[in-house]
Structure formats: structure tokens, C-alpha cells
Image (cartoon, rainbow, N blue to C red):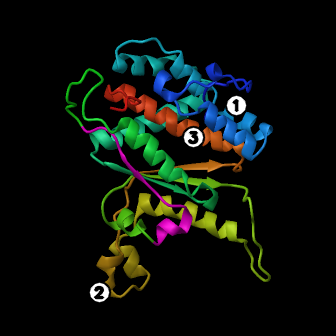
Amino acid sequence: MLCCAKYQVDWTLDKFVTAKTKKCCRTTLMAASKTAFTFCYEDEDDFVASTARSKKRVLEKPKSDPLVEAVDHFYEIPYEDLDLELFDKVCLLSVWNVSFLGYPARAILPYTQALEKLAPHIQQVSMESNGKGVSIDGVSLPFEAGEIDFGEPGTNGQHSFYQLIHQGRVIPCDFIGIVKSQQPVYLRDEVVNNHDELMSNFFAQPDALAYGKTPEQLRSENVASHLVPHKTFTGNRPSLSLLLPSLDAYRIGQLLAMYEHRIVVEGFIWGINSFGVY
């Protein structure tokens, strides 16, 4: 599904170049070291390996006009390189939602408690990197750029801000689900486990956003007439669903690579300096 540049784990500074110099990603020597010491070298290897191709592709791009560079980038992707094709489609969808449809926010909604810090992390990376009002040349942008990122894991968000997402403002959503639970809990006499119940919510929410529910459907369900307007929601609201086989170091690396790739390519298209902090 995703990826970025494979670096050998020899702990030399030149192998782990920071985002500030290469303007590509935030996988630094310190972050890699912490991953290895907290978990194990094998997990760190998997994490770094999964972030291989898309970082490398961005690092190897020639310096040119940002918009031309972005367009050339899409033409260069081989047909069989489906992970990068997915990355770029995700980037284009974000640009479309922000700059063309005028949706300023994005909700990041992982259906696993293990990713509870993903939304705050992407919020910092994205909003600091692409929160710019001028181009790389210092000219005011004639369009909206950057996104307001926020989110909560699983049903925490459902009981917090999903009401707004379904019936209030249009907010594009990223739903992230995991096929294999890290800690499934089975209760006696229960047909499904806790992870199955969680995943039923994961599949139901994008459907509800897409299709909504009409007054006619509500009346056919014998909903009281005075409640019909309050239970109606229009649908046709954008969302993206990512389903990972499991949540291991390799998949987490893929997930972070996708968001970092999205930020970089958005910056190319908008013509801004994504990793310039002033």
C-alpha cells in the first residue's frame, strides 16, 4: 500500500538526514534510535524499511519549478508501483477538498487505541509544514492552502464530534481500520469480540457519510414525524478508508510515510515551502 527511502541502520548521522535539510520527512537519527531501544532492532528495521520508496522518490527529484516538478512526478510513477499511485491519489484528493471544494479541515480517525497519538502527530507535521499563506517565492497565494487536522480514535470521536461531521459542516475524514486486533477480548455468550464490534463501526461510518438517510427512509422506519428533520442527514460527504492487515512496525511506517508523502506533494502543488519554518 505505501512506502519511502530505505536507510541502513549503521547509526551514522549522514544516513538519517532531517526534514529541515532534505525537506522530505521527519525520520531522524534520534527517532530511529528511540524506536530501536524502546522495542528492538528488528522492529526498527521494519519501520525504516516500510518508509522506503516515496522518501527516495522525493529526495531524488530534480530542483525545478514546484508545480512542474509535481506534475512530472505523477507521470514518472510506473503502473505497477501501486503504493505510490495510492499516495498521490490521496494527495490530490486533499488538494481538491481544500483548494477547490473549500473544505478546510480533515479528521483523522483510527479505529484502534494504539494510534491515539496519530492525529496530534499529523496535526503538528501537516499544519506546521503546510500552514503557509505565501508561495516559496514569497508571493501571496491566490487560493486556500493547508488543512486543519484533528481526530480521535474509534468511538471516542463518535461520541465527540461525529454529529458535526454527519449533519453540520462538511469535513473530509480518514478512517483507519486494522484487520487483526492486538488485544481481542472475548466475553462468554457473546457472538463477536470487542474488535469485531469496533470494526462494524469502522465500516458503518463511511457508508453513512456517503449515503446519508432521507426523510422517506426514516418514515419507513416509523420514526416520529417531529423527529424526522433531526435524524435526516444528506450524505455525499467525502471520506477515505484505509484497512491495514495488522498494526506492526512495518504498517505504522507505511502509514506515516503516506501522510508525509501527502504533505510534501501538497506543498509541490501549492508551490509552498512545506518544511521552511520561519
Residue 197 in sight from this viewpoint = yes
Say whether disc 2 or disc 3 marks the residue closer to the N-terminus. Answer: 2
Residue 23 in sight from this viewpoint = no
Residue at 54%, 51% (x, y): give it. 118
Whether residue 64 is in magenta: the answer is no
Question: In this rendering, would 209 be left or right of 232?
Answer: right
Question: In this rendering, would 247 be left or right of 107?
Answer: right
Q: In whole angstroms, how far apart are the C-alphas of marks 2 and 1?
A: 57 Å
Say whether disc 2 or disc 1 marks the residue closer to the N-terminus. Answer: 1
- Which residue position holds label 3? 256
Q: In whole angstroms, how far apart are the C-alphas of marks 2 and 3?
A: 46 Å
> Which dot marks residue 49?
1
Residue at 75%, 76% (x, y): give it. 191
Q: Quadrant of residue 45?
A: top right
Residue 170 or 183: which is nearer the viewer? 183
Q: Which of marks 2 and 1 is in front?
A: 1
